[in-house]
Image (cartoon, rainbow, N blue to C red):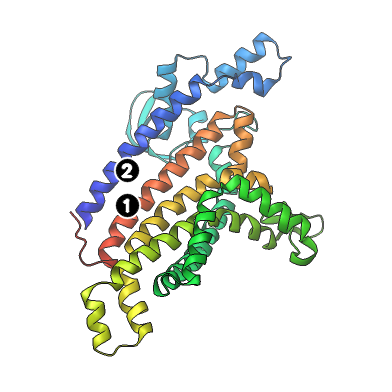
Amino acid sequence: MIGYAIKKMLYGLLVMAGVVLVVFVLFNILPGDPARMTMGQRADVQSLEAVRKEFGLDRSKPMQFVLYVNDLSPISVLKNDSTTQAKYHYAKIINFDQKALVIKWPYLRSSYQTKRDVTAILSETVPNTFILALTAMIFATIIGVFLGVLSAVYKDSWIDKSANAFAILGISAPSFFAGIIIAWLFGFVLSDFTGLKMSGSLYSYDPFSGEILTLRNLWLPMITLGLRPLAIIVQLTRSAMLDVLAQDYIRTARAKGLSRNAIIYKHALKNALNPVITAISGWFASLLAGSFFVEYIFGYNGLGRTTVSALEMSDFPVVMGSILFIAFVFVVINILVDILYAYVDPRVKLA
């Protein structure tokens, strides 16, 4: 188990290294001058050069990449000065004359626009997006597995046909289109009955009470974000259940006189969960990335909305930090799911 986990972690590091390279190259070929976006269109040449020097944009592209990797790496070479000590969180391993080999927390740099640490920006927005993605996944899993089981048990009935039609509709509708329709219908046309608004974040600001948790603003983006994984889970659960219900051991359980609920939920459903777990793991990480447009449509303050706003302002450190965080979540979830397989299905062996 430990050896398997270490091997997966090494693969994950290779994936993250590839993501860093691709993201860095892409953002360096995109049009736009971060210094110009920071200082404005009327900035003079001296001011622009000073900003480029501050951000390290005056160096060659290969050197910029080396310095960026040095910032991200947990093992780095840093200068021994007050600026470095204020910027990084590290512990020295080997001390040289003016530099030191250190173990440190990965540094995602500072925003071009606000000069704030990207890690601090992400720490404010990631929890909101995580709550949105988690509730959307819980909503999709509970409803999806329930409808999938019903569809398999009552195969070819009106329940089965209705569940399949709903699944096809959910897969066909893009999140940005479904979000607009849901926001308009439930947040505007039926707002007097639903009590919901077209836009709003998880926390609203009150001048007297400060930040207030506003859960009603979570409903519409949660449903919008959960529609597509819900549709996938319905179809996967139905297909897996039909396959399992046709197995010999299910017929043996029926012959022994076990109740239908015991056969379905104790024997069949447990063995049909592997593809569902795969879908849940993949979709949960995808929901973090898929929340970009949903958060923008509903005015939900999260990672997606922050990233889109940063991209509009050419605030590349914030965008790159967001992408690297999502890639890291993908890697971690895939490792955990591979290990979870062995516990859910004894037939799966870790190699």
Question: What amino acid does circle 2 point to?
Answer: Gly
Question: Residue 304's image quarter?
Answer: top right
Residue 220, which numbered label? none
Secondary element type, mark 1: helix
| Quarter of the rendering containing residue 41 | top right
> Quick check: marks 1 and 2 in contact, CB under 8 Å?
yes
Q: Position of residue 120 (x, y in %)?
A: 57, 43
On screen, residue 221 versus residue 160, left or right, reads right
Q: Which residue was labeled with disc 2?
A: 12
Q: Amino acid at mark 1?
A: Ile
Q: Is residue 136 above or below residue 344?
A: above
Q: Residue at x 30, y 73 (%)?
A: 245
Residue 80 seen in the current view: no
Of residues 155 and 324, which is closer to you in this image? 155
Question: Around disc 1, counting alpha carbons within 10 Å, would you say few (fewer than 14), some (14 to 19), or many (20 or more)?
Answer: many
User: Among all residues in the image, which is located at the extreme bottom?
Assistant: 257
Whether residue 169 is situated above or below residue 106 in the rendered picture: below
With 199 as the anchor, is 86 left or right in this view?
A: left
Q: Residue at x 28, y 61 (%)?
A: 341
According to the image, label 1 marks what residue? 335
Q: Secondary structure at mark 2?
A: helix
